[in-house]
Image (cartoon, rainbow, N blue to C red):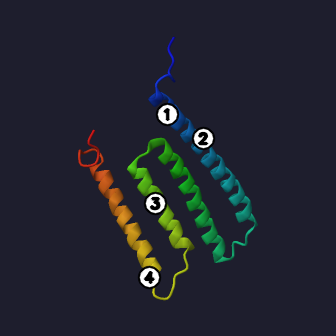
Amino acid sequence: MNNHFAHPASWSAFCFRLAGYNLILAITLGTLFFTYESFYILTAMDWQESDTYFLLLRRILTIIIGLELIRFIQTFSIETLIEILIFLLARKVLIMEIDENYAGLLVVVSSLCLLIGMQAFVRRYAHTKLINPH
């Protein structure tokens, strides 16, 4: 008789995989519900106002973040994590109130530049022994 759950490592791998699938399902359902809700909120808004376009951009970025998070859970790659952080910072730039001295904007823009540089570095050296020793 072949019992796959006799070894504790296979049991923990199964639990980890099951938790990942449940998390993917929850994020997918949440993203779908958010997309459905966004459609009805945006159709009811006045498109003559500029705030409607900012809300549209924020909601699109939130949906993209949800989809990227699903992809990250499936792949566990550093590239996907960096892309999620870039979308989060882009959304932060849209949401934040810019103060008079632009200190907050400077931090966000410099962080965004750093993440884009990291993404270019990872894409360039992802297949070398510098990042992936296997």
What amino acid is at disc 1?
Ser
Question: Residue 32: x, y in percent?
Answer: 66, 50
Name the residue tied to disc 2: 22
Who's the residue at 51% across and 85% down the image?
99
Task: Please say if the residues under marks 2 and 1 sit with CB atoms less than 8 Å apart.
Answer: no
Q: Whole-Å distance between the Cαs marked 2 and 3?
A: 23 Å
What amino acid is at disc 2?
Asn
Mark 2 vs mark 3: give the one in front.
2
Secondary structure of the residue carrying numbered label 4: helix
Mark 4 and mark 3 lie on one chain; the one further toward the N terminus is 3
Rendered image: mark on residue 132: none
Mark 4 and mark 1 lie on one chain; the one further toward the N terminus is 1
Rendered image: mark on residue 103: 4
Name the residue tied to disc 1: 12
Q: Within 10 Å of the Cα at label 1, are there few (<14), some (14-19), or many (20+) other Cα atoms?
A: few
Question: Residue 36: x, y in percent?
Answer: 70, 54
Mark 2 vs mark 4: give the one in front.
2
Rendered image: mark on residue 85: 3
Mark 2 and mark 3 lie on one chain; the one further toward the N terminus is 2
What amino acid is at disc 4?
Ala
Task: Please say if the residues under marks 4 and 3 sit with CB atoms less than 8 Å apart.
Answer: no
Secondary structure of the residue carrying numbered label 3: helix
Q: Within 10 Å of the Cα at label 2, are there few (<14), some (14-19), or many (20+) other Cα atoms?
A: few
Mark 3 and mark 1 lie on one chain; the one further toward the N terminus is 1
Q: Whole-Å distance between the Cαs marked 4 and 1?
A: 46 Å
Who's the residue at 59% across and 66% down the image?
58
Q: Is residue 69 left or right of residue 121?
A: right
Secondary structure of the residue carrying numbered label 1: helix
Q: Whole-Å distance between the Cαs marked 2 and 4?
A: 40 Å
Q: Whole-Å distance between the Cαs marked 2 and 1?
A: 15 Å
What amino acid is at disc 3?
Leu
Mark 2 vs mark 1: give the one in front.
1
